[in-house]
Amino acid sequence: SLSRHHVFSKGDVCNPRLLNHIFSSKNIDVIFHLAAKTHVEASFESPSTFQQVNIEGTRVLLGAAHQARHQPQRFIYISTDEVYGASLHEVFDESSPVRPSNPYAATKAAAEYLVRSYWDQYKFPIIITRSNNIYGPRQYTEKVIPRFLTLLQMDKKCTIQGTLPKSRHFLFVSDAINAFLLLLEKGIVGEIYNVGTSCEIPIMQLARELVRMVKKVPESEVNDWLEFVPDRPRVDLRYPIKCEKLQQLGWRAEVSWTEGIRQTVKWYRDNPDFWHKFKLRLLFPVGFHQQKIIRIVRIDF
């Protein structure tokens, strides 16, 4: 529930009339731009929708913010580690070249260039973050952890794509939020900051761990809850990043994997119907068009 200090507006990030109205009727000081389509598989199936939401939506939001009568103090664009492309051995920092390898990542990289152009041309006060996979309660079920959890709650097997040793770095949601708020306070405008974690988990290990936690079966039966499905032709094995630049501002990830995944599993166990109407979509996730939403919250202190 929102207090009297908050105004909640729900709408399409690609709607210039809505955004211009919000920025003309409210004094917006800070924008955290997180609205995006993010499902990599779906981006191969329908790249044009990703271009519309992730690039055009960013352009519309930037334009409305820049033209606002009350000039924002910060525009923080939440990007992704996937803009770097994959690497087996190289660890990416903010100066590493951008080499996206899927349509989703390509649209996020293009949106970054749009955001940076407003800094270069107008000195509009932007900051860009590139973060690892964020996880935690309430996450949409197209993402791997809630997808596995929801499938197991439905007595379905965890579907693992291909047999290559894929892994991902997982950052708990509260640690990500603390990083974004720290950058709001101490981040340098015009700069890019990686938001990373040393917690790298192989997808196979992740699935097995979640099976043990949810189904509570003996080790000999864990594999019975795993199912291998065809992979897409090219898959990125890992996205390693370093974040010394952010750590120099005083940020550290504080929630351990053990504690973070415990909280996440408990929340999905206690809220089995949170994404009830989307559960059947889990069986056919590719091509599902996630609603493109922007949420703007004004906070009066």
Image: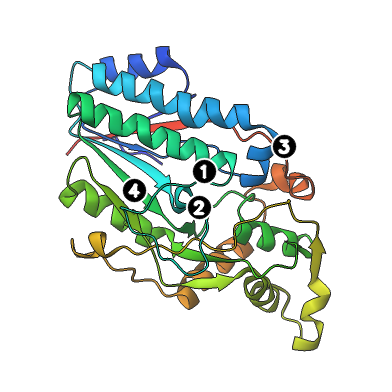
Q: Is residue 3 above or below residue 60?
A: below
Give the distance between the C-alpha atoms of the residues marked 1 and 2, in whole angstroms.
8 Å
Label 4 CA crowd tier, 10 Å (few <14, some 14–19, many 20+): many
Q: Tell me, for residue 129, which label it has, or none.
A: 4
Left or right of 232 on screen, residue 117: left
Residue farthest to the top?
A: 17
Q: Which dot, 1 or 4, sits closer to the camera?
A: 1
Left or right of 243 on screen, residue 276: right
Q: Which dot, 2 or 4, sits closer to the camera?
A: 2
- First of labels 4, 3 by sequence position: 4
| Tag 2 secondary structure | loop
Give the distance between the C-alpha atoms of the residues marked 1 and 4, in whole angstroms.
14 Å
**39 or 45: which is nearer to us?**
45
Give the distance between the C-alpha atoms of the residues marked 2 and 4, in whole angstroms.
16 Å
Name the residue carrying label 2. 85
Give the distance between the C-alpha atoms of the residues marked 3 and 1, in whole angstroms.
17 Å
Name the residue carrying label 1. 105
Q: Tell me, for residue 287, which label it has, or none.
A: 3
Left or right of 108 on screen, residue 152: right
- First of labels 2, 4 by sequence position: 2
The three-letter amino acid code for the residue at tag 2 is Gly
| Tag 4 secondary structure | strand
Give the distance between the C-alpha atoms of the residues marked 3 and 2, in whole angstroms.
23 Å
